[in-house]
Image (tube, rainbow, N blue to C red):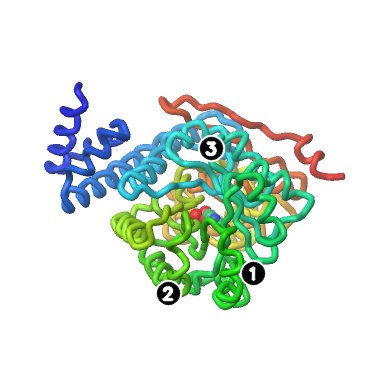
Amino acid sequence: MAAEKKIEEMIRAVAAKDIGSAGRYHALSAESRRKVLGALDKNGLKALTQLIKESKRKSFKVADKRILDIAKGDMATPVYLLDETLIEENMRIMQYVKDRTGCRMLHALKAYASFATFPMMRRYLEGVCASGLHEARLGSEEFKKEVHTFAAAYSGKEIGQILKRSDVIIFNSFHQLRQYGPIARARGVEIGLRVDPGHSEVAAEMYNPCGPNSRLGVVCNAFKEEFQAHREMVDGLHFHAMCEQNSDVLERILRSFEKLYGQYIRRLKWVNFGGGHHITRDDYDLERLIRLINAFKKRYGVQVYLEPGEASVLNAGVLISTVLDIVKNNMEIAIMDASAEAHMPDVLLMPYRPHVMGSAPAGRKRYTYRLAGPSCLAGDVVGDYSFDKPLKRGDRLIFADMALYSIVKNTTFNGINLPDIAVIREGGKIEAVRRFGYRDYRNRQS
Ligand SMILES: Cc1ncc(COP(=O)(O)O)c(C=O)c1O
């Protein structure tokens, strides 16, 4: 079908609020998507956003059944099962934000670094953000697009290798900028400076990058004192102040950031709004994000980068475990082959309660169990959950939303084996991409 005809049909489908228009939009070329967006008025754009979100929500719902069916099979556990089609659904949302704003989108490797899905992700994103040498190397070798590196401090031992692997390096102090900036310049690496935007709304101090006495980002007073002298060396400013938040929080952060740093922005090439944007969550206000980015770009004439991590793989992977034993001590305790401590560390650190498919809070359904790991740690407990039927040894339990900050953070505490990693590819084929064993444990000891 001729491109013009596809565009006309697309516009009609949006006007008719046809949910199929989301799929059609994603299938268009970049040029045709631009034409569609140019032809839609404000209400048409809002309608398209809703249709795209609705279509994504539907795909995730269908996937739940797929995962339940797979878990019933004979797959070895524990296993992180990543659904590539769902990650792609998330990528499409990011693509849409890019289409509407012209911003550049990086994936934060710290949240998810399973390179088995990078060939798909790289079609949608500009590159990755890295936290140091190894992530920068993984980004350059496996993602093979832009690498933007930020670390709270760089060591002389690693800086050369980091610069070799990075397109952009972001410093956390004027001292490090003076120390390594000239080498970065000489090597053609762009330079950024992380600043404290002066506002954040993260309740848990552990996850608040801008809390009292935070080491992350130059504070405004220091910036004002020193920036002038280093201006020529700085291409962009970076801030990161959010955690699993919506665009209303970004709006308030930008208000503060612009008040503090607005006068310095126009001469820069870019501003990086960091991560923590839950862009792919169902209730995320995409229209507001789009409005904020467009207004910012217009006001200052700079490029905007976003570097979400969680949002890339939100709800797109599970951890499947098997009940090994059930013991009693005032209540029934199911001991699984997956460990909270070793395989889902944020459950204990944050702490939070992951959803287990088919379960309800303790006491809500007929049979309540404490779900616990196999390690020696008394607190290796995911939580108390209830089920319609009694649990049996050999039953499978599926922990939802486990692609993010789990595989990258797991450990071999107690010598417990790491879960396998498997990917559900387009078309439903399951590929076991990694199996771990004794050597992985041994290699990390002396
Ligand atoms: C500098 C920076 N960028 C990006 C991210 C990614 O954040 P998220 O995974 O919450 O989107 C983080 C998370 O800690 C970060 O520290």
Circle 3: element type: loop
Q: Is residue 224 left or right of residue 57?
A: right
| Residue beneath disc 2 | 259
Q: Which mark is residue 95?
A: none
Q: Is residue 86 left or right of residue 432?
A: left
Residue behind label 2 places its C-beta within 8 angstroms of ligand 1: no
Q: Is residue 281 left or right of residue 199?
A: left
Residue behind label 3 places its C-beta within 8 angstroms of ligand 1: no
Task: Give whichever of discs 2 and 3 has the lower sequence position.
Answer: 3
Q: Kindly report which numbered mark, 2 or 3, lies closer to the viewer in this rendering.
A: 2
Relative to 65, say whether 159 is above or below.
below
Task: Give whichever of discs 3 and 1 has the lower sequence position.
Answer: 3
Other-residue count near label 3 (Cα within 10 Å), few / some / many at <14 / 14–19 / ≥20: some
Q: Is residue 368 visible?
A: no
Q: CA distance from mark 2 to mark 3?
A: 33 Å
Other-residue count near label 1 (Cα within 10 Å), few / some / many at <14 / 14–19 / ≥20: some
The amino acid type, in three-letter code, at marker 3 is Lys
Q: Which mark is residue 145?
A: 3
The amino acid type, in three-letter code, at marker 2 is Lys
Viewer-closest of 291 and 260 = 260
Q: Which mark is residue 215?
A: 1
